Image: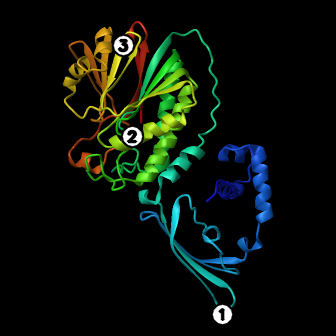
Amino acid sequence: MSENQRLLYQLEELLHWKKSKKFYAQKLGVSEYEVNELMKELKQKEDPKFIDNYTEETRKVNVEKGTIESVITSDFEPKDDIELAKLHKINLDKYVITNYWSKMLPSGKFTSSVFSKRKQAKDYSPEDFSKFLENYKPNNILVTKIPNLKDVVNVEISLSDYHLAKRTVDGDNSIQARANRYLDVAQSLINKVVSNYHIDTVILPISNDFFHTDNYQHQTTQGTPQDTIMDYSEEYELGFSILVDTINMLRQYANHVVVVLVQGNHDRTKSFYLAHALDVFFKEVADVDFIREHSVVKGITLGNTFIGWHHGNCKIEDLPLLFATHPQYSQAFGNAKYREVHTGDKHHYMAKEVKGVRIQQMPSLSGTDRWHLDNNYVHSVRAALALVYDVELGKVAEFESRI
């Protein structure tokens, strides 16, 4: 499907909302002039055979299997897959037509049958992904930076172990709710910070099991099967969109955003692809940087404070020594006045100090799945944190948002 056909299809669906051209332009990520031209093209191509001259006989949608079966009788015979998909209301961006047939009835009408299924990982090509990145446009967010006389600080926003596609046992399995929650909690945390401080740099660690699975077999990196609420490709594309919106939101409140890849044990491969795609997407944005090399340890110095990250699927008491002897981070670790190591993995909050090094295990917003329930890993407080650092004094505040 060409880009123009895609826009025509999307606009045709939006027209049912009966909104302004400005609204359609914002939704499609194009100008109002382009919307006007698309509407002219729709009017020119409008064919009465698509309006009232067909009756839908049957339509079966299996949400769990991701299939649509449709049989329609019409006054015409669809000439290609695009026309067939339009007649049967099949979104070719999300579904692929696997079988169809069409024949003339004794009455002179035509009946057509379509079987389509939701696209799987194997249905996508590298060209599809490249086109997705090329055409993806985030929500339009007005960036306004208001100066104030508050202390200037750096902030880490920690939404660890999100497990986007995880199926929970508590009924919290709405995909849209999951998507909204991440951005809403990040917004809540940053609001708490800016009510007290002016922000120079925001650090956003990503991954730390942001995705629940690492492959299209719905398995972790080590091959452990997982219960999910969406498939591999849907989780990836939704996760990409969530983080684009979150990064753009954080840019409104800071001079600089640094995205740090902390690879987890559920999504080590997929999270690397995610960080790379985000880096490419923001390559022309001067105030966004990435620390995303393929390594399970990352580090940064904020004023007098060194912060090291590791997912935490190890003996965490050994992590200070790991950073102290690390070829890349040992010098920064040794020169810092304050030293911290941040982990996730366990889905509950914990903080301890080992030989002057603060180890902080971040909580998770994720609910309880079947495995955690069966093994009595339950009742953890679901939360995310904002950690505030003064350049000279080190960590000076911590804000928390709970759900």
Q: Quadrant of the C terminus?
A: top left
249 w.r.t. 103: above or below: above
- Please name whichever residue, 258 or 12, is drawn nearer the observer in this view of the structure: 258
Q: Amino acid at mark 2?
A: Ser
- Farthest-out residue, bottom: 106
Residue 271: assigned label: 2
Residue ID at (73%, 74%): 49
For mark 1, does the 10 Å Cα neighbourhood hold few (<14), some (14 to 19), or many (20 or more) residues? few
Q: Amino acid at mark 1?
A: Pro
Residue 106: assigned label: 1
Distance (Cα) linking label 1 and label 2: 57 Å
Q: Earlier in the sequence, mark 1 or mark 3?
A: 1
Q: Amino acid at mark 3?
A: Thr
Q: Is residue 294 visible?
A: yes
Distance (Cα) linking label 2 and label 3: 27 Å
For mark 3, does the 10 Å Cα neighbourhood hold few (<14), some (14 to 19), or many (20 or more) residues? many
Q: Which residue is mark 3?
A: 305
Q: Secondary structure at mark 3?
A: strand
Q: Earlier in the sequence, mark 1 or mark 2?
A: 1
Q: Quadrant of the N terminus?
A: bottom right
- Please name whichever residue, 399 or 387, is drawn nearer the observer in this view of the structure: 387
Image coords of residue 248 (percent x, y): 56, 32
Residue ID at (49%, 34%): 279
- Which is closer to the viewer, label 1 or label 2? 2
- Please name whichever residue, 301 or 161, is drawn nearer the observer in this view of the structure: 301
Image coords of residue 141 (percent x, y): 62, 33
Image coords of residue 394 (percent x, y): 38, 11
